[in-house]
Image (tube, rainbow, N blue to C red):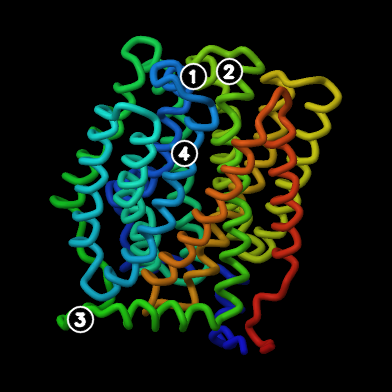
Amino acid sequence: MWEPAPATFKQSIMTVTPASDSEPRSLGMTTLLAMMTALGPMASCLYLPSFPAMVAAFGGTPAEAQLTLSVFSFGMASGVLVYGPVADHYGRKPVLLVAMAIFVVASLACIFVPDLQTMAAMRFIQALGASGPLVLGRSIVRDLYEGARAGAELARLSSIMGLVPAMAPILGGVLQQYFGWPSTFIAIAGVGAFCLTGIALTMPETAPSRQSRRMTPGDLIRSYVFLSRHWVFWRYTILVALSYAGLFSLLSASPHILQDIAGLSPFAFGVSFNIVMFGYIGGTISGRMVVSRVGMERAIGIGTIVALVGAGAALATTEMLGVTAWTVLPPIALAYFGIGMYYPQGIAGALIPFPERAGAASSLMTSIIMLLAAIVGLVVGHSLGDTARPLTFALLITGVLSLVFSLLPTGHSEQN
C-alpha cells in the first residue's frame, strides 16, 4: 500500500516560496556545489572525443569503449546507495571528503591501464567517488531550501553545472588532438583535486542532524523501505530516470554517430556537442522562469511535451535527410531543452517530501537514474551501426514514457 505524501506537498509544488532573508546566497557556494555535482558528467563527457583514439591505442572496439561509459554509470548507481544515508547519519562534509579522494586517485589510475577492460574497472572505482558529490550536492540544496524554491535552486545549479559538460567535449577535443587521451584523465583529476580543496576549506556542514552512534546496515534498509512505500517518490524518480536515460543515450551514441558516420574531427565533435548542451542549459533557465509563474507540475508538463517534439523531429530529420551534424543536433537540442525544463523539477519533487531523509532519497533516486541510464546506454552502444536510429528511438521511447509519468497524479491524496 502506498503511503500518502505529506499534506503540504501539493501546495509546495504548485507555488513558489519566496527566499527568506536567512537563506544562503553565496555565489561561491553555488559554484562549488555545481562543480562537484558536475564531476560525474565531466568525467563522462571530457573523454568522449578520445573514443576512436582509445580504440586504436588498445586495439579494442567501439562497443568496448562505450562499456567504459556504461560501467561508470553502474558505479554511480552502486555508490549513491551508500553515501546519502551515511551522510544523513554522520554529516555531509566528512563523507564528501572521502568520496572526492576516491575520485581523484581513481582518475589518475586510469592513465596507467593496459587495456580497455582494465579501464572499465578503474572507471567503476572513479564512479564510486563521483557518486558522492552528485548525490550530496542535491541533499545540501534540500538542506538549505524548501518547496518550489528548492526546484528553482536545483535549476540554477543545473544551469551552472551544465556549462561543464558543455565545455568538456571541446576541451577534450583539444587535449586529444595535442596531448592524447591520457591528458583527459589528468584534467579530470585536477578538477577533482580543486573541488576537494574547496570542500575542505570553505564548505560548512548543512545536515539538519547527526547521530553519534555507529550506523548499521539495518539503518540503510529501513530508510530505503520507508521511501519505497511512497508513490510520490517513485513517480518523480522514474520521470527523472527516463529523462536521464535519454541524456545518456546521446553520450553513448554521439562519438560514433558524429565522428565515424558524420565525419567530424575530435575538436569539431566537441564544438558541435555544445549545440545540445546549450539547449539543455537554456531549458534549465527557462524552467526556473516557468516554475516561478505556474508551479512545478505545470513546468514538468510543458518540458515533457517539448522534449517529445524534439525527439520526434530528430527521428524524422535523420530518416529523411540522412545522418549529418545538422540533421542530428538541432532537433536533439530541442529535446534537451525540454529535458532541462523538467529534470531539476523532478529531482526536487522526489526530495521535498522527505527532509529528514534527503540524503537517502537522493541516493535511492540517483541509483535508479544511473542504473536505467547504464542499461539504455548498453543497448544503444551495442545497436550502433550506420544510422542514428539507436539514439533517436531511445529519445523517442523515453520521451513518450516521460510524458505518461508527467500526467500521473502525484499521490498527495490517493492510496492504492
At a point 66% along the width and 47% down the height, the residue shown is: 338
Which is more toward the observer, 157 or 59? Answer: 59
Residue 259 - label: 2
At a point 29% along the width and 51% down the height, the residue shown is: 29
Residue designated by label 4? 69
Q: Nearer the viewer, mark 4 or mark 3?
A: 4
Are the residues flagged by discs 1 and 2 in contact, CB closer than 8 Å? yes
Where residue 59 appears, as percent x and y from the top left, is 44, 19
Residue 52 - label: 1
Q: Quadrant of residue 187?
A: top left
Where residue 324 appears, as percent x and y from the top left, is 71, 18
For the residue carrying disc 4, how many other residues have a C-alpha within 10 Å: few (<14), some (14-19), or many (20+)?
many
C-alpha span from label 4 to label 1? 14 Å
For the residue carrying disc 2, how many other residues have a C-alpha within 10 Å: few (<14), some (14-19), or many (20+)?
some
Say left or right for 24 vs 312. left
C-alpha span from label 3 to label 1? 49 Å
Which is more toward the observer, 216 or 258? Answer: 216
Check disc 2 and give the amino acid type: Gln
